[in-house]
Amino acid sequence: MKTYQTQDTALALTLSTCGVPFFKDSEGRECPFVHIYTAAILRKLGYKGIPFEDAARTARERGQNGIIVYNFERTELCERIITAYFKFSQAIAKADELKRPLETSINIDPIEAAKFGCQLLKNRRRFTPLELCKGAVPYICIDGDSKTEQEDGKTVTIGSFKLLQLDASTEIREHLKV
């Protein structure tokens, strides 16, 4: 099954509320999100001059989050909801830009709208980064070597990176050469 990943919490909440299943790993375990620290995020949080992993551990202990990436199964329903979500988001943005009320109607039964709104608003708490990251082991993003290639007369730089769980064992670190 293909994965759809997003950092948009509102979209993730919408997908979940509409019944799109979270991604499952090869062992069938649900993997709703990944929490990642990058060097850039840690610098933005004020961590300078200390080892990368120490900065990530300290940030975690202080409740300072990195990037949250939500993982869903890329189903037909998922695709339809994503399309509708972005189309409606654009309509909202345009209405905001023009400083006018949104001129659109949603054809939905009022009772179903009330149920959906209730579920969406009740579930939003579990989608906050602070709530999601409780007890979750974050990953650190270690930059790898970049290479530059010529493609159709253009110079393209391809970066590489490795994601490593913050508490990865020595054996895993040696295997990944980090």
Image: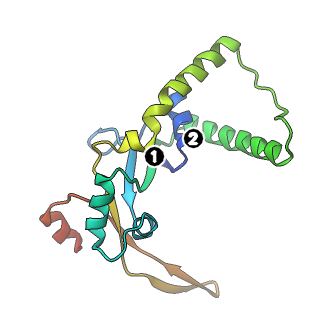
Query: Is residue 109 found left or right of 105 in the rendered image?
Result: left
Task: Tell me the quarter of the image containing the N terminus.
Answer: top left
Q: Nearer the viewer, residue 29 or 132?
A: 132
Whether residue 105 appears in this view of the structure is: yes
Element marked by disc 2? helix
| Residue wearing tag 2 | 11
Q: Position of residue 19 (x, y in %)?
A: 50, 28
Residue at x 41%, y 56% (from the top left corner): 66
Residue at x 71%, y 42% (from the top left corner): 89
Q: Residues within 10 Å of mark 2 (few under 14, many from 20)?
A: some
- Rendered image quadrant of residue 79: top right
| Residue wearing tag 1 | 70
Q: Nearer the viewer, residue 68 or 45?
A: 45
Q: Position of residue 81 (x, y in %)?
A: 62, 36
Q: Are dots 1 and 2 in contact, CB under 8 Å?
A: yes
With respect to residue 17, does 54 lie above or below? below
Q: Nearer the viewer, residue 56 or 47?
A: 47
Task: Tell me the quarter of the image containing the C terminus.
Answer: bottom left
Residue at x 31%, y 62% (from the top left corner): 56
Q: Position of residue 103 (x, y in %)?
A: 85, 33
With respect to residue 13, does 168 lie above or below? below
- Rendered image quadrant of residue 96: top right
Q: Which residue is situated farthest in the left direction here? A: 171
Query: Is residue 114 found left or right of 1 in the rendered image?
Result: right
Report the Cα–Cα distance between label 1 and label 2: 9 Å
- Rendered image quadrant of residue 30: top left
Whether residue 32 appears in this view of the structure is: no
- Specify the amino acid type for callout 1: Tyr
Residue at x 52%, y 35% (from the top left corner): 13
Q: Nearer the viewer, residue 72 or 59?
A: 59
Element marked by disc 1? strand
